[in-house]
Amino acid sequence: MSAWLAILGINEDGVEGLGAIARQRLASARLVVGGARHLALAAPLITGETLAWPRPMDAAYPAILARRGEPVVVLASGDPYHYGVGAALAALLPGEDILCLPQPSAVSLACARLGWPLAEVAVLSACGRPLAALRPLLQPGARIVLLSADQHTPAAAAALLCRHGFGGSRLHLLEALGGPRARHRVLAAEAPLPDDIDPLNLLAIEVASGPRAAVMPLASGLADGFFAHDGQFSRQEARALALAALAPRRGEVLWDIGCGAGSVAIEWALRHPANRAFGIEARADRAARAAANAEALGAVQARISVGHAPAALADLPPPDAVFIGGGGHDPAVLAASWAALAPGGRLVAHAVTVETEAVLLAARAPLGATLTRIAVQRLEPVGGLHGWRPAMPLTQFLAVKPYD
C-alpha cells in the first residue's frame, strides 16, 4: 500500500506556498484534518470532508486511522515534525503509510528574518509545556526562540526574565510569520509589552544578564542559595560529589530517596532535558518546598511526591540510578533500591550517622561497593578573627550493579 496519509506543512501564505505534490494531495483528499486556521488557509483546494482538531487532539486519531487506505491529509504548521503532530501520527502508523511534505518551521522563518544561525539557537515550546523550562537556558549571550502558546506567553516570559535579573534582554516579537500579516517588533524584557499581540507569535530572545542576574552555572553543584531549604538537604560540595558518582546520562531516570529540598533530583533533571527524576520525601512541607525549587529552577522533569520508602517506590518507573540521602539507616530501602536497578545502574548513598554507616558497611562487600569519607571545613568568624569550622563528616557509598 502506498502512503495514504499525507501530513502537509502549511504556513501563513496558505496554498500559494505549497508545492505541486502537496497541492495535488490536498485537492484529492477525501478527508482533511487540521486546526480551524489551517483549514481556512487550505480551503481553496479542499474538496473532501474536513475535520477540525478536537480537544484533546488525540481524540481525532481513531477517525484518521479508520480511513486507512483512503487519501487523507493532515495539516500542520510549518514542519510537522518540529513540535508538531507528525511524531504522534508516526507512532501509530508504519512509515510507508505516511508522506510528509514540510514547509519551513516557525523557528526557521524567525532565524531567517533575524539572520541568526539556526544551529546556534536554543528552541523551546510553551505550547502545552511549562514555561519554567526557559529558566536554565538563560545564559549570557544566549539566543533563544520560544514558541508561544498564545498572546499571553510573551508577557509571562518577560516576567520570568525580569524576576531572575535578565530584564535587559532584547525581545523580538515575531507575529504571523510567513504571511501577509507578518510583524516584527523589538523591545526590552523590562519594557511594557504591546496589548495587541497576535495569538500566532513567537519570541526570539537575546539574553543579557544584569549585575544581579541569577545565572545558573553549567556545572553540577549549584550554590546552596539557589535552593529554599530548612537545613535538611545535600549541600553544594556533597551534592557535586553525589552527581559525579551518579554519573547521569541522557534519558536516564533517578530515584532521589529522602530528597529534602530536592537538590539532587533537580540537578539530575537539569543535566539533560530528557532526564527524569523522582524525589520521595516523607514530610509534606519539605516535599512542597522541593517541588517549588524544581519549578523555580526549570527542572520540569523532576517529580516530587510524599511517601515513605520502600513502600513509596513501588509505582515509580525503574531507575537507572538511585540516590539515598535520607532513610539509609533502613536496610530495606537499600535492598529495594538495589533490586530495582537494571545492570549498569548506580546506587549512591550518603551517611552522616553511625547507624546509616553501619548499614552501608554491611552492604559494602555483598554489593561490591566503595566507601569514601568526605570532610569539609569552612572558614568562619571566631570572635574578631577567623578559623576553620568542620562540617559533619560524610560517608559516600557507591555501588554499580553488574551485568552478570
Image (spheres, grey):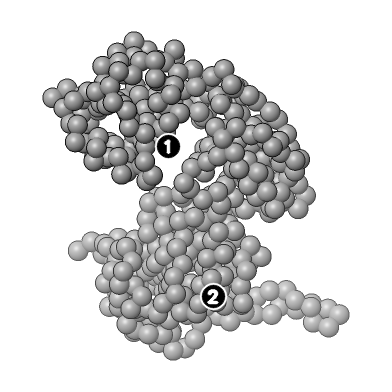
Q: How many marks?
A: 2
Q: Is residue 152 visible?
A: yes
Q: Residue 345 location, x and y as percent?
A: 32, 62
Q: Is residue 24 above or below residue 281?
A: above
The residue at which mark 2 appears reads as: 286
Q: Residue 185 location, x and y as percent?
A: 68, 28
Q: Residues within 10 Å of mark 2 (few under 14, many from 20)?
A: many
At label 1, which amino acid type do we have? Tyr
**Front disc: 1 or 2:** 1
68 sits left or right of 302 in the view: left
Say which of 52 and 159 sits in front: 52
Q: Residues within 10 Å of mark 1 (few under 14, many from 20)?
A: some
Q: Residue at x 50, y 28 (%)?
A: 106
Q: Residue at x 49, y 55 (%)?
A: 300
> For residue 206, which quarter of the picture?
top right
At mark 1, the secondary structure is loop
Mark number, residue 23: none
Q: CA distance from mark 1 to mark 2?
A: 35 Å
Q: Is residue 242 above or below residue 100?
A: below
The residue at which mark 1 appears reads as: 83
Q: Residue 328 location, x and y as percent?
A: 41, 81
Position of the C terminus by quadrant: bottom left
Q: Residue at x 37, y 31 (%)?
A: 34
Q: Earlier in the sequence, mark 1 or mark 2?
A: 1
